Image: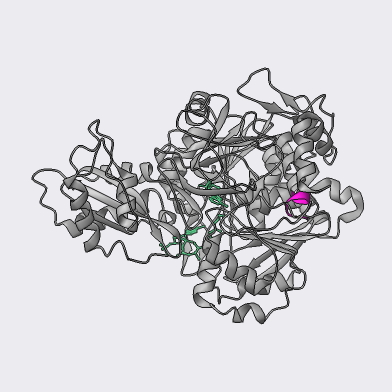
Amino acid sequence: MGYQDVYAGWRADPDRFWMQAAEAIDWQKKPSRALFDDKAPIYEWFADGMVNTCWNAVDRHVAAGRGDQVAIVHESPITLSTRGITYRQLQDRVASLAGALRMRGVEKGDRVIIYMPMIPEALEAMLACARLGAIHSVVFGGFAAHELAIRIDDFQPKAIIAASCGLEPNRVIHYKPLLDSAIEMASHQPEFCVIFQREQEVAKLVEGRDFNWHGFQYGVKPAECVPVEGNHPAYILYTSGTTGQPKGVVRHTAGHLVALQWSMSNIYNIGAGDRFWAASDVGWVVGHSYICYGPLVAGATTVVFEGKPVGTPHAGVFWRIIQNHRIKSFFTAPTALRAIRREDPDGEWIRRYKLHDLQALFLAGERADPDTVKWAQQHLGVPVVDHWWQTETGWAIAANPIGIETLPTKPGSPSVPMPGYDVQVLDESGHPVPPGTLGAITIKLPLPPGALPTLWNAESRFRHSYLDHFPGYYETGDAGYVDEDGYLYIMARTDDVINVAGHRLSTGAMEEVLAAHPDVAECAVIGVADALKGQAPLGFLCLKAGATTPHEQVVKDVVRMVRDQIGPVAAFKSACVVERLPKTRSGKILRATMAKIADGEDFKTPATIDDPAVLDEIGAALALLGYPNRDKP
Ligand code: COA
Ligand code: AMP
């Protein structure tokens, strides 16, 4: 069967399609049906089944005789180490950690925050929670203590599992002091913390609250897998919305398992015994779906990579790992390829390695620019599959499903909708637009298994953010179009979310930080085009009357404040002081128009603008910073 048949098969009978897909999962009790729509528009999948994620990701492979296969490879070009953990070892380690968590009172439904760098123990912590039916929330290491504190207060964890430090190429990230100050800032207090001490930095433990990862597990009874209902949350992952309060995306257990298993074989063409690598971070959705759960549920080998595409130590590190571990499908962000291409435009590093096993390169996280796609295709000689998805969906909305059939690729397009996704491009009044016409990209409800049913403790925010604008549809927040062949093109966000080096960031959250500066009366943050990172944030500051601090100092202050409060990952490095911000007569800041001026794109002066002269002032301020030609792609 080709893609068209598979997609048509899903459309004809979605319940049958997903019940068939569910057969690839081990159930304690099989679900009676796939979709549960009695609470629509809150939809659930396989809700009355009983299942355990850790069993499906680990134990079942040992039971099937694959215990000696490597489950996790850790590659750290920063510590110059490589190690492998087999499925049997993983089972022992996870059962032991889960047993220790249980001894301290962690049970099904309890919450656990995981704040760890790219080490196998991060996956073990996730799996140990899954084993008990505890709900985890992994927080990305590049976030500052304040962001961690926000998540602690929203998620109310019983325990936090962290590492003593993370390693960036140029410095040690002191996780433990960040964790301590986050706990100090938060109103909610965890009952205990488990700290994995790395040899690069041994953290000071707080007596009575903190336990050493190893000592904590000493002599405990390993825990068995606890079956949970299909609609039991497996994890919550916070992602950027339009304000400083991140959205807690809920992932239900059964739909997550079924969707990931389906995607591993049909999209990535990966099955038991294959080797798969997603070069992302456990703190992002890609890390959840395709570093940890997807490849392990499929019985494949996954790679945990602690390094960068360039500089650790060179632009050939990806290809070395692909060669040495005989990777079959590789997944990275376009920005990583742009970084490599900058250093290795002719692909000399690529030619030094034997990449015979590599069948396809997958790109996601941001728009894959056609130049980068063509460069990779030319030098790697394998299909380069751009695929589009979001933290909310947990797996690809649109892709080229090479496990079913390799469709012709069109650089600039993430190809076609996957089964489960009825993608519709709508105009402002909610009507479908013809092919080639730009509109809001929506998905007709219900979303498929694996996608979010709601937001953590925030159902009305869920409805308001995603469902209210186009009743009956999920609003993705992306704008784009479909061509005559049904290929999708994702062009821009329709909200104040920007994408910096494949990291999703909220300009609203940065504005909240800037506005807290004592001299700032008003501010705006926009995303401007950046040759390496896709977009970079840029701030505009209007100062209070009578403010005497030199402008350069205010700019320095706000750059430091964003780094301290959101984190280095925000990459907020420039801002300028302006007299006024361009606004509509109703007071809405015209951020999209400002971004067009910065990028040197054509724009129409909005009819609702209060004073068009402000746009000239913005243009002049941008010119002083070198825009529109600064570092344009
Ligand atoms: N913990 C702590 N700090 C982190 C971090 C982490 N896990 N990850 C990144 N940071 C810091 C970096 O050290 C850097 O700090 P600096 O301002 O002091 O240099 C800052 O956050 C920005 O990091 P990054 O976005 O990684 O930029 P970079 O300039 O260090 O590297 C690239 C540029 C393109 C090589 C890098 O962004 C990259 O590999 N991108 C791929 C992203 C990706 O895989 N995204 C996942 C989506 S699928
Ligand atoms: P995140 O939730 O961090 O995965 O970010 C999701 C957002 O990143 C999407 O809504 C898009 O705006 C963007 N994005 C992810 N993948 C792609 C892609 N392949 N093409 C275009 N944009 C993408």
Residue at image position (40%, 49%) is 566
Residue at image position (11%, 47%) is 547
Q: Is residue 574 visible?
A: yes
> In the image shown, does 205 or 423 lie closer to the viewer?
423
Image quarter (top left, top right, bottom left or bottom right) of the C terminus: bottom left
Q: Position of residue 451 (x, y in %)?
A: 64, 36
Left/right placement of residue 246 relative to residue 390 reads left
> In the image shown, does 145 or 385 lie closer to the viewer?
385
Q: In the picture shown, does residue 357 fall above or below 85?
A: below
Image coloring type? one colour
Q: In the picture shown, does residue 368 fall above or below 250?
A: below
Left/right placement of residue 100 relative to residue 282 reads right
Residue at image position (40%, 42%) is 496
Residue at image position (60%, 71%) is 77
Q: Quadrant of residue 583?
A: top left
Q: Position of residue 305 (x, y in %)?
A: 63, 63
Name, please, the residue furthest toward the right.
Answer: 65
Q: Which residues are magenta?
A: 264-269
Left/right placement of residue 566 relative to residue 467 reads left
- Look at the image and say whether residue 421 sits in the magenta stretch: no
Name, please, the residue furthest toward the top.
Answer: 38
Q: Position of residue 127 (x, y in %)?
A: 70, 45
Q: Position of residue 377 (x, y in %)?
A: 64, 68
